[in-house]
Image: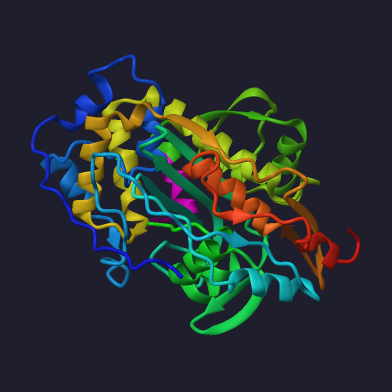
Amino acid sequence: MKKEKKAAKGKKEKKSNPVASFFWTNKRRRAKNLFFLLTVCILVVASGVGYVSNMLDSINYDDKRQGQSVNVPQDNIVDDEDVKIMKAINSAGSLNEYLYEWSNNGGELRSSKNVINVLLVGLDSATALEEGGRSDSLILVSLNKKTKKINMTSFFRDTWTYMDIAGNGRYGKMNSSYYFGADDALLDTLEKDFKIDIDYYVAVDFSSFTDIINALGGLTVEVQQYEAEYINRTTVHTIDYGPAVKLNGYEALVFARIRHSDTDSDVSRTRRQRQVISALINSAKGASFSQLSSALDTLFKYVRTDLTKMQILSYAAQALANGWVNYEIVQTPISDEDVFRTGWVGDQSVVIMDFPLAAQRVQEAIYGVGESNIVLEDDRVIPFSLVSGF
């Protein structure tokens, strides 16, 4: 079972270092700085000056979850407690039975005092403040102070899974857990599937990125010919294809959300989302201070999080003081063929995930090689064998 979480303690706001210096004083800082700003801005927004503090007031703070967050902001590296070994499922008569057993096996979630796990949720609702939307994009950003790495894990929204919705079990696609149970259900489902402790979440209305991208003057991405043809056929916009195509906010949003032009399910879709993130970094790198200010002001209005304002400022101060912005950015390889398959459950096209194998890889990517508590035995059940057509 999950360890009892400690209430996070905020630090005093840092009064020095104007926000502008974060961007402009060191010209050699690479786009990693801006990656934090635009995709993990809750962790690294800037020094805690009054200007930034006022901007943070526009964020929508999730009162019902505040106080549940786990990681107390700290600078030092500490020894972690041992976690219990967890075995994969060795008996299941159907896919749903397998998913239920894995979700409810009672294994201890992997966590570390040296790691901060933040789930970024892109919503397709009218606003991130509303429940009833679906989680269109799921990216776990994990900062490891011991390995000095930042890991990005993209989860497939169409992954077929078991979910507990306020005590009622049901099966469906991963993104529907938010639709039925909002943030609590989504976090609970991901934690039980991948056996990791998620410290915080940041939910953003995905469509708000239209205004953010426009505020930065657009972005440039590589567009494949078939992607351009799909956009030109299904929208009133006409774009080119090639290694460097300039897109406005609406075009970039459509590009990131293409779903029906690929043969590899969500793999290409998550690739395009990472392309947009990288392009945002480059756009922000060349943007003026007023453009960046406008983009942040737009973004924060559409953000909901269980972080407190003091936690945000505390983490931001640590990020600047301890060089988090210089950490290596890596991605977790859970899109390999041995980890997932695409298939059908009833009349729904879904992703079938080998959760024990995927969870082991995610854990080792986040916490370090050899740091997974999942044991894969030879007699374990492979879920693909439980679905016809594999």
> Which residue appears farthest toward the bottom when viewing the image?
168
From where the camera sits, is residue 16 visible? yes
> Which residue appears farthest toward the left when viewing the image?
15
Image side of residue 55 versus residue 235, left or right: left
Q: Which residues are magenta?
A: 200-212
> Could you say where residue 85 lies in the image, as x and y percent from the top left?
55, 59
Q: How many marks?
A: 0
Q: Residue at x 41, y 51 (%)?
A: 118
Q: Residue at x 43, y 62 (%)?
A: 127
Image side of residue 182 versus residue 48, left or right: right
> Could you say where residue 340 lies in the image, as x and y percent from the top left?
74, 52
Which colour style is shown? rainbow
- Foreground pick, 343 / 2: 2
Q: Residue at x 40, y 32 (%)?
A: 148
Occupied quadrant, residue 228: top right
> Could you say where residue 304 lies in the image, as x and y percent from the top left?
35, 60
Which quarter of the image is occupied by the C terminus?
bottom right
> Could you say where residue 138 lies in the image, as x and y percent from the top left?
53, 53
Is 179 magenta? The answer is no
From where the camera sits, is residue 255 visible? no
Q: Residue at x 57, y 34 (%)?
A: 275
- Foreground pick, 46 / 257: 46
Occupied quadrant, residue 61: bottom left
